[in-house]
Image: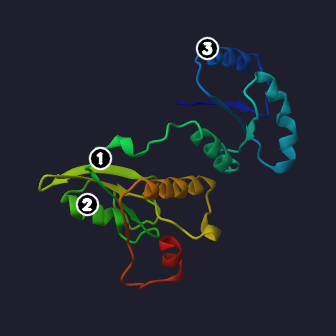
Amino acid sequence: DVNIFMVNQREGLTQTDEMIAQMLYKTNKPVVLAVNKVDNPEMRADIYDFYALGFGEPFPISGSHGLGLGDLLDEVAKHFKDEGDDLYDEDTIRLSLIGRPNVGKSSLVNAILGEDRVIVSNIAGTTRDAIDTEYSYEGQDYVLIDTAGMRKKGKLYESTEKYYVLRALKAIERYNVVLVVLDAEEGIIEQDKRVAG
């Protein structure tokens, strides 16, 4: 759906970059330009030469420090086709499981399915993206979606985690039933109210 063209800020614009750009023009696909190794804000001033490649605004990122990745992923996601409800038949019941990290959403999906279909771990944040699983029960088709755990805004430590939460929120919009999963041992906490809200 979309190409990410990554260049190196430290090397500047190179002939190889220009050669790759020529190949990307021929694909007739959207191109998002990522300028890597922009490790601090002062280095952002050195990315403007990359406008010459003709792909619009370059996105300064630092792969090693995780800087700018959220903005890059947001731009990339704009080019994805809307998944919408037409992925499944109209009669298919779509059920989304949401909640804080490590409350047991993946374990519940596996229990409903009667098999280990999604990864379960004691480490919070194992589920990083929304995972659709289709199954049938007594002649009725269902789709279960196991979503990434939602943290409160102040706890979004990784810029990529913001993307996973946005994907979970999008999943909620396209499902018939949303099941909020809570941790019975901890009880309902303020973060659960935010997730349910």
Given residues 17 and 3, the one toward you in this image is 3
Reading the image, the residue beneath label 2 is: 110
Name the secondary structure under disc 2. Answer: helix
- The answer to whether residue 118 is seen in the rendering is no
- Which one is earlier in the sequence, the residue at label 3 or at label 1? 3
Given residues 12 and 130, the one toward you in this image is 130
Reading the image, the residue beneath label 1 is: 90
Q: Is residue 190 left or right of residue 55?
A: left
- Rendered image quadrant of residue 55: top right
- Which one is earlier in the sequence, the residue at label 2 or at label 1? 1
Q: Identify the residue at image location x=21%, y=58%.
A: 113
Residue 9 at x, y percent in the picture? 78, 34
Query: Farthest residue in the front direction?
Result: 90
Q: Which three-letter amino acid code belongs to the residue tagged 1?
A: Glu
Callout 3 environment at 10 Å: few (<14), some (14 to 19), or many (20+)?
A: few
**CB atoms of marks 3 and 1 within 8 Å:** no
Q: Is residue 167 left or right of residue 116?
A: right
- Rendered image quadrant of residue 72: top right
Q: Which three-letter amino acid code belongs to the residue tagged 2?
A: Asn
Reading the image, the residue beneath label 3 is: 26
Query: Farthest residue in the left direction?
Result: 138
Instruction: Tell which tag, 3 or 2, sits nearer the viewer.
Output: 3
Q: Identify the residue at image location x=42%, y=84%.
A: 186
Callout 1 environment at 10 Å: few (<14), some (14 to 19), or many (20+)?
A: few
- Gap between marks 2 and 1 measured at Cα: 24 Å
